[in-house]
Amino acid sequence: MSVEVASCTLAQLFSSQRIVCANNTEIVGELAIPEYQRPYRWGEVQIKKLLSDYQLFLDDLLQNQTLYGYYLGSVILHQSAENGQLNIIDGQQRLTTLALIIYVQHLSRITKATNTFDDNKFNCSAFELSLSYDSPESQQQIVKNLAWLNEQIKGDYASQIATFDAHKINLTLVVTRSEDDAYRFFETQNTGGVRLSGPDIIKAHHLRAVERQSQNEFAAKWEALGDLNPVVSSIIKGRYWQKLYNRIVPSHRQPHLVRSAVVNELGESTGKGEDIAFGRFERAYLPDGSQIDKQAQQGYELRQPLNSGVNTIHYLSYFEQLRDKYLKSGLKQKKINVNTSDISGSTLSRFFHFYRNLICQLDGCSYLKGLYDTALIIYISQFGEQQLDIAAKKLFRVIYSPRVSNQKAVRESSISAFVRDTPVLDWITASYTPKMCFDYLDRFSFMADPANLAVDKNSVKKRFVFNVLQHLGIELVKDDSAQAIADNYTAQLDAYILPLSAEAEPSNQVLTRKSSGGLHG
């Protein structure tokens, strides 16, 4: 990795002055923001912190007469071989905010404004600075922040804005001639740092792999997906928790390890190639010897190999669409009423009734729900809505069993052990039909532990047992002994869920895996 490092002031950087590196080479060029960068999102909270930190520096300067400037940290740049521009890879949020502060400060000192923010271009005559922001979100945030800063000229932060001096702000420039090296350094910084989430980091990786003329289009597609952290969490679980190659999913309490896992699995480990979706198709052999093929699966497989760029972007988009349609709606909708015994009702309405009215209402089960949601996404990606209401109940019986078979609460660390011993995700991916999947699930057995189910207990576990059976229309006697409640829960749940079966499936057909290119999820 070829990297040049230099120290400079903010004034030098904004004025496009020649900056001498540690190895005596020079950096010169105009700052630019790549089209595929994430939008500018800093708001009032971050600006206040920056101005407050700068005030602490000024106070220290007055007391100690120090010669040191205010240190802003490092900024990572890629110098384009085409036009010599210094593309901002890491530091856009800080540099844009500082430019806005200088903009407002300069505006307040002159009678005729020569600073402008027209359309998507920001110009500041205090320095030779002109930056373009293509994202509507960036443009809106800049206008909003300018309005707030203008208010502060005579407000609480008036002194900080008035005394802001770009010549006293120091930073470290990290410059590479290779865009790949710049992002590799950026990813290294952020997997060990605190600023960005995994999806934020891999966004840059994949947009760089898209043809330049399409980068704006795919950047807009990515932004339209919103917060990808929940679906990426499910994807990591689905790809890590498998019997043949079991890996430990990092705890949410270790965000740096979570970022590292996401960057490695969905960024660095992706290959090069076209947009390929691996899936299944059915081949039915007819009595006359002819055959009929039909696509059994319309999207991507969660555990499939991925290629950088369009392939991974479409893959993430596909699974986010599944999450939004089938799972996210469960959090947004109120409870719904449906007659679950009415077989004429749609599979989807019965599924939503179960998911919204039971799964989303259970307390103390967040780690189990993470596994459950992953299982549902894998099932839906393979079988669509086929027998989805039955699948939801059979998956619940297996995945939520630790809630009653454990003496104590289900901890995050225990989920990995449960999946290792009970490879429920593998049962889904190894199945060619819903019936085959249900057979795997029905072979699972468990016994509820009576701990914390006594008459005088009002534990989370006891409330769970009664809420589940009440939802299924099964009554338990609350005054029964703990052992009786435990035994009845297991027996009643099995009696309700195990007889549920898939519809008869066509015979004389072969299901085969295949891949298809250019699927847009």
Image (spheres, rainbow, N blue to C red):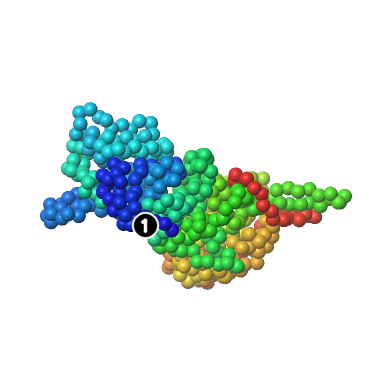
Q: Give the residue at the far right of this rendering.
A: 288
Q: Residues within 10 Å of mark 1 (few under 14, many from 20)?
A: few
Q: Quadrant of the rendered structure where residue 127 is?
A: top left
Percent position of residue 58, x then y: 17, 50
Q: Is residue 151 visible in the rendered structure shown here?
A: no
Left or right of 439, for residue 243: left
Q: Mark 1 = which residue?
A: 194
Residue at (32%, 35%) from the top-left corner?
123
The residue lying toward the viewer, choosing from 31 and 432, is: 31
* SS for callout 1: loop
Q: Give the residue at the far front of this rendering.
A: 24
Count of number-bearing discs: 1
Q: Is residue 413 visible in the rendered structure shown here?
A: yes
Q: Is residue 163 above or below residue 422?
A: above
Percent position of residue 239, x then y: 55, 60
Left or right of 3, for residue 465: right
Q: Quadrant of the rendered structure where residue 6 is?
A: bottom left
Residue at (81%, 49%) from the top-left corner?
291
Percent position of residue 355, x then y: 54, 52
Residue at (33%, 57%) from the top-left corner?
23
Q: Is residue 232 above or below residue 520?
A: below
The residue lying toward the viewer, choosing from 303 and 380, is: 303
Residue at (50%, 66%) from the top-left corner?
248
Q: Amino acid at mark 1?
A: Val
The residue lying toward the viewer, choosing from 88 and 514, is: 88
